[in-house]
Image: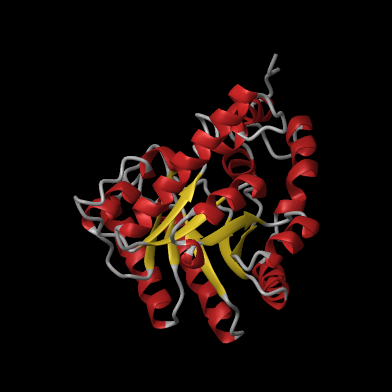
Amino acid sequence: MVEENSFFANIAFRLVRKHIAGTTVATVLKRAMEINKEGMGATITFLNDHVDSQAKAKYNESAYMQLMHQISRLNIKANISVRPTQLGYAIDENIANKYMSNIVGYAEKNKMIVWAEYEKKTHYTERLLRNGGMSDALGAEIPYSLALKFDDKAGMHCKLIKVVPDIENGDTSDEIKSGKGGKEKKRNEKTITEYVECLDRVCGAGARLSLFAHDDRFALKAIAKSKHRKGLILELPFGYSKKKLAKISKERINVNIYTPYGKDWVPYAVNKLTEGKRHKIAKLILEGRHPG
């Protein structure tokens, strides 16, 4: 990745800054309270990914502990989202598990949820799904393609699941077009049906499900057809269109806002705000290469 003050990074930041709730804890807590006043919950994450030592992993653990303390003290309706590598998972799994245990233990006592974000290069969330977590307050974030492989007969040990787009392979919502051609319409209907079956399979296995989406049209269609509609939570990125949020609120759908803060925004911009072809183009631009 290029340095933050580079030409490409500066352009990219202008495009994504509305999706970042500031750089400090005070700022993100203020934004979370505003989200609560609008009748929604917040899922807060700290943007600090460059962990190459145990000291940095410990710093991130302390940052999350302090964040949760403030959430509890101010009685904010919010959960947190953690990338396992932030806690040193790629360096020392035992240390990372200890830090995650500390975070989850605090969250459990204060009735919060900790989401372990999916990271392709690590196997933390897959293990969490197969073996169960250390607490029912710990949830696993998984891509749609992995959720499709769930076999409810085999049993699922994690009780909190969040399904997210398949970033590198293209989000299913990319297939929802405005065209009305016969072939296009059939493909869209097939995609929706497949997604609904996935959601119902996960919920049917006894898990509480959240759905992260960039495309409200796709998400609303899927949720409307799900047998578990009332229990689903739709999670949208911070900075989402207020007009669209107003429309969604009329559907009486549970909504959470994914609310990041911090200075290390580049990985977030690429991995959360882009998918499919846009994901690849974003990576090329931020690496200083022409996408053509």
The number of discs equals 0
| Residue at image point 76% right, 63% down | 246
| Residue at image point 56% right, 55% down | 224
Residue 101 position, x and y percent, is 32, 67
Q: Farthest residue in the front direction? A: 182
Q: Is residue 128 visible?
A: yes
Query: Is 154 above or below relative to 39?
Result: above
Residue 173 position, x and y percent, is 59, 38
Query: Is 6 above or below relative to 69?
Result: above
Residue 191 position, x and y percent, is 51, 36
The quarter of the image holding the N terminus is top right
Residue 142 position, x and y percent, is 41, 47
The quarter of the image holding the C terminus is top right
Q: Nearer the viewer, residue 69 or 275?
A: 275
Q: Nearer the viewer, residue 39 or 104?
A: 39
Q: Nearer the viewer, residue 240 or 280?
A: 240
Q: Nearer the viewer, residue 155 or 80?
A: 155
Quarter of the figure with residue 208: bottom left
| Residue at image point 40% right, 46% down | 198
